Amino acid sequence: MIAFLVKRIGNAILVMLTVAFFAFLIFRFLGDPVEMMVNESATQVERDELRTRLGLNDGFLAQYVRFVTNAAQGEFGLSWRNQQNVITLIADRFPATFELVIIATILSLAIGIPLGVFTAIGRGRWWAEGLQFSSIVGVSLPSFFVGIILILAFSVSLGWLPGYGRGEVVQLGWWSTGLLTPSGRAAVVLPALSLSLFQITLVMRLVRAEMLEILRADFIKFARARGVKRQALWFRHALKNCLMPVVTLTAMQVGNLIAFALVTETVFQWPGMGMLFMQAVTFVDIPVMAAYLCIVSFIFVTLNTFVDIAYAVIDPRLRAA
Amino acid sequence: MTIVDQTTKNIVRSAPSRLARLRDSDLWWSFTRHPSAVAAATLLLLLIGSAFFAPFITVQNPYDLASLDLLNAEIPPIWMEGGQWPFLLGTDTQGRDLLSAILYGSRASIVIGAASVAVSLIVGSSLGLVAGYYGKWADGLLMRAGDVLLSMPTMLIAILVSALARQALPPSLREVGASGVIVLAISLSAWVQYARTVRALTMVERNKEYVQAARLIRVPTWRILVKHILPNTTTPLLVTATLNFGLGILIEATLSFLGVGMPPEQPSLGTLIRIGNQYLFSGQWWIVLFPGLQLCLLVVSINVLGDWLRDALNPKLR
């Protein structure tokens, strides 16, 4: 078990160092940090002084090591665009993305699991097969187009829900939440729905496949022979046994949702990390881009490693791998 | 004697043509039995055909500035009040016929999707063959690289690569190279899937007798890899390639929608949707709706085909 832990965590660190290396390459070689930081009238001497002060004349490896040490402490330097501390910029935007992703995850479970159960128990009926077929359509719909359709339907035509922004937010310490105000709650519905659609179809197809397998198991036949009611059989006996893969999928997909939130946030003008990143891309704000890359992959790698370790704790057969 | 002759003749005559072999195969049988697959294939053929013959069937070249007239801007679809012939689906804010722009855009999407599949398929399967056949450090290096790439979402890598490449390229190359950059951005993480599949199958195949026999008679290694092992790995690759074709189209559209894909002067469904998105609240819904629907039709028909193919090629489900 110890060997497995060391290997998994070592692997995670290796991946992070590689990502940091690419972030460093971007940071160091795409555009000149000195040119971006001094004003037009700075003399050559001032520029050289700044170059030395920033350590840009040091060896390549030394600069990489310093970049990683700083990044590990959350120090990504100043934004080229507005001279603010990059990590404060990201910390400002993080709650918006986090709330969006969490609500999308809850929606995907709340809608995906019942749909999966229904398509499994109704297998062969027209409505279950129709739902199963529509899940292929759900996987194929481009997430930004789903968002636009939702805006067109519920915001432009019907006028029920806001189509952009985050509504009113309440500050709780450094965390800003939109969930405590009515306008904030209304604003989160459409983006969360559009972000979760893909996830809903994933959860639904997974639950369906697992349910079909479990409904064939002996303990289900035995329970039916005992006279357990059908509803209890489906939702208590069978469903409980297929939730483990769903939990795994959900945990692994949080990283994907954060990445996809980038698209959703652009469509809905949602002031999260993804929109910050897209703005950074437009203005070639390299420090923000490098920091976003590092932070998102950190979340992604941490989640994957946790899932792997949790699995190994539960299932000893996996420890050998 | 005559009977034997007859039989031999029959055998010789009945050596079937490729088409006959296809019509006789399990795959074709399964295809005819699945109406959704037939419908998807028909739709896809129509979409691809109309996209490639776009210059002959459209009323204008929407990306030739000389053929545009600002007086024609923002005309609604023909069945609505104010609709005008020949603008069946209306025009955008620059007076482009939307149907023409959609067909030209689909052509770009299809070409980029296919090119990204070709690049990642060739790179992925060659690396997978080498890693699976030789093992050792080549294998370790390849699998680690794959792990790192798969530790990031494909879409994020594509966005990053595409955004950064635009900064790194000299301005004169940015427009010409845009589609190439997008193909690379998609292929950069897509090859891993092919490499892993081919590697796993190669590791099984390399110990089989026919490979040992080929080695004994000194068939060159590259020939063993390409002519003997590779054909045995194609079936699972076919499914991956089909689904990745759809994914490639989707990623290209997303990149262009975000403004890091195709430049605005070049046809692309994603760019059309991006432009239309700015007019969402001012009533010109058709600029965003029709390109989006076309994109959905393309990707849905490809994915339905891929889904059918996966089931049809899965021996367990037969």
Image: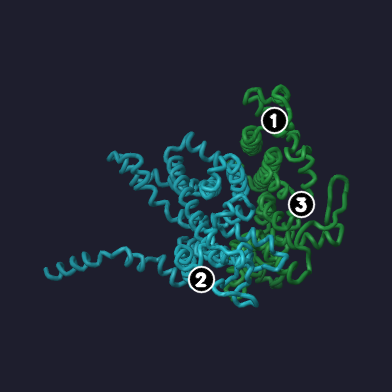
Chain colours: A green, B cyan
Q: CA distance from mark 1 to mark 3?
A: 29 Å
Depth order, front residue of A167/A229: A167
Q: Quadrant of residue B92?
A: bottom right
* Vertical arrangement, residue A263 with respect to residue A237, above or below: above
* Vertical arrangement, residue A164 with respect to residue A313, above or below: below
Q: Position of residue A169 (x, y in %)?
A: 85, 54
Estimate how packed mark 1 is, as few (under 14), some (14 to 19) or many (20 or more) residues with alpha carbons within 10 Å: some
Furthest residue in direction left, as rendered: B1
**Residue behind mark 3:** A271
Q: Secondary structure at mark 3?
A: loop
| Apparent side of residue B197 relative to residue B154 in the rendered image (left or right) | left
Q: Which mark is residue B36?
A: 2
Q: Which amino acid type is shown beneath numbered disc 1? A: Val
Q: Quadrant of residue B248?
A: bottom right
Q: Position of residue A32 (x, y in %)?
A: 66, 32
* Vertical arrangement, residue A297 with respect to residue B55, above or below: above
Q: Earlier in the sequence, mark 1 or mark 3?
A: 1
Depth order, front residue of A297/A123: A297
Q: Which amino acid type is shown beneath numbered disc 2? A: Ser
In front of the other: label 1 or label 3?
1
Residues under numbered marks 2 and 3 in contact, where contact means CB atoms less than 8 Å apart: no
